Image (cartoon, rainbow, N blue to C red):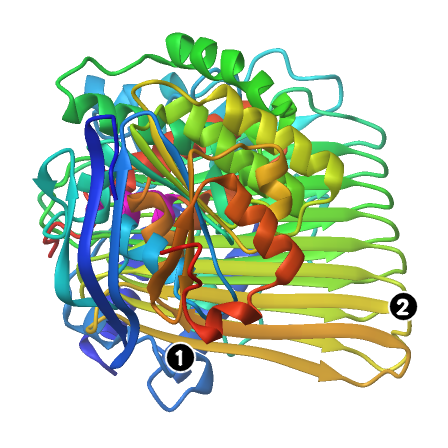
Amino acid sequence: MSNFSGQLAAAFERAAPALPGHANPALSARRRAALDAFMQTGLPGPRDERWKYTSVRALERREFSLAARGEADPVTADAEKSLALGQLDPWRLTFVNGRFAPQLSVLDDLPEGVVLESLGVFLDGHADRLDELPDQGFAGPSDAFALLNTAFMHDGHVLVLPDNVRLERPVHVVYLGMPRDVSLMSHLRNIVQLGENCEATIIEHWLGAGRENEHDNLTNTVGLSLLGKGAKLTHLRLQQDSAHGVLVDRHDVIQQEASSYTAHTFDFGGKLVRHDLNTRFEAPGARCELNGLYVLDGRQHVDNHTRIDHASPDCTSKEQYKGVLNDRAHGVFDGLVLVQPGADGTDAHQSNANLLLSGDAEVDTKPQLEIYADEVRCSHGASVGQLDEDALFYLRCRGLDESAARGLLMRGFGMEMIDRVDSPELRQVLEGMLDQRLAVFGENRP
Amino acid sequence: MNSKNPIMLEIKGLHVSVEGKEILKGVDLVVGTGEVHAIMGPNGSGKSTLANVIAGREGYEVTAGSIRYQGQDLLPLSPEERAQEGIFMAFQYPVEIPGVNNTYFLKAAVNAQRRHRGESELDAMDFMQLIRAKLDVVHMSEDLLSRSVNEGFSGGEKKRNEIFQMAVLEPKFAVLDETDSGLDIDALKIVAEGINSLRAEDRSMLVITHYQRLLDYIIPDRVHVLSDGRIAESGDRDLALRLEKEGYAWLREGPTEAAQ
């Protein structure tokens, strides 16, 4: 047993009696089984094809404190201000260093029948109602971080919409990291269930406050979204973790007939980030759109794995991820589009485009199509390049100096992804974030 | 080459090579302030090279000669310094820049030039007022402002956007590189009218074109024929009419007596 595993085993014994839902024997058994399964496999290594370009071995040398339950850490006025999203007035669940912070959350005026709660609160209040939450889609045994998450999940968010509910306000879920004197590990589990013809926007937001934090927090988020017939979910994923933050994030989406799932993943922060975003069409006529943008410098490492499972006919998927990489940043894109036997009428398009601004920056891109049906329209492609010289000259001919011209082109490259967000208010927020990101772009980061 | 007006641009003995191949082989040209000169010439004569050298494009190596602009040596200046000093090039092939909003780009350009002149930057409101007033110059529809620069624009819209930018940036010296290419007759008229409306006593233009057609609408003060990297002929607009009738073939036989 590695040091890391030993640490975890001991931490589990200490934490288990107080984990939410501990009164439910089935849940406790599931936690223990997940931990045992993790102990068998340990963290994924370089021989695991899915972790070929992203090493988490360094985690094994770290000491982590488990983000136990209890009162949330104090939040500075600045950090509190950073929760705001421009003109938007969202419902909000804020987790500070993994702990639910009711005073920083807004959960009033919810429509009738809508459940929007912290998972901890839900399980404490209704450990017997665990069966009401969907059990599917919990990660398989080979996924080490999902196993850890199942063993330790101490909070997260639950959103359940009965049929025909359209949420007028977005749901903003913030994982706020405040500097601490120890490295924290938090495991958050998120469950979203949209009934038939529901419509909702969820903004997941990994936000690291305070660059002075010298500790590598590990945030492990695992989510499941179930979309009923005709349901429509817009899922923004804003990753602005601290410069020392380690994030492992997995989200599974299961879509019923004619449902629509749109994800926009923006990676602006973090030190070591891994996303797994998986969608599966369970019934015909559904569509998904996966958009992503990563803007990286210093020694940032961001890995986006996606899997779109066309398990039913007549579904449409559109995927585009774009990356801007400077300094010694490392980006990974691994996207699988799987067209199952019988999934005729599939329309699937996938692309990944990267701008490499430095000779030391690196990107590994692997767009994959696996097609086992005949009547399909599929395309995929990847590119890695530099800024367009003709465009640079054009801008300079209008009076912009070289650095301003380069900045404008980088901004344009990113704005293409921001322009895909429907909400003008959100676009404005994102535009501000991109500008803020590019303003310090290329300054030496750790 | 005499010019009654103070000199705006003076090119002397200009030799330019691209990838080691000599394209311009001794160009002499003087453009006075407020004048419009046309450069005509067959394909491959060096017209676009001349435009790009004035704008400062990389890869165009000046091996001999000089370009002076308002008495200043132009060649050491970067493209942006030239633009800030009042030089504008309307591109033959305007570049599409996805994701860069037309208005955002123009505001950045206007303010870069204002900063250079020591003027205060325009805020969003003043800027919108400025550009709305300029839309009429080329009958440009306002919704093109909120689109990405040239992306998905028709050929005509791209050329109009160039002249619109010129109207907003108010250069002292404009090089129009085959602004007429790819335009149908209606679009050509609109663009030409826009250019005419921008003629001014303190602004000079170099209109580069393959066809005489554009010069039916923009009457130049002088016409120069570029052939094999040199100015082979200069004259008034009658020279353009003659080229229209006789083509460029006679140039190969050398300058005619009439032109000497």
What's the residue at 28%, 41% (across, down)? A437
Give the distance between the C-alpha atoms of the residues marked 2 and 1, in whole angstroms. 31 Å
Furthest residue in direction front, as rendered: B257
Give the position of the N terminus of chain A as an image quadrant: bottom left
What's the residue at 81%, 72% (across, down)? A377
Near-viewer residue (B39 or A146): B39
Q: Secondary structure at mark 1?
A: helix
Near-viewer residue (B132 or B62): B62
Say which residue label 2 marks: A313
Q: Position of residue B15 (x, y in %)?
A: 21, 67
Furthest residue in direction bottom, as rendered: A47
Does A132 lie within the magenta span?
Answer: no
Q: Are marks 2 and 1 in contact (CB under 8 Å)?
A: no
Which kind of residue does numbered mark 1 sit on?
Answer: Trp
**Range shown magenta:** A401-411
Q: Quadrant of residue B113?
A: top left
Which kind of residue does numbered mark 2 sit on?
Answer: Pro
Q: Position of residue A91 (x, y in %)?
A: 54, 21
Task: Tell how many labels.
Answer: 2
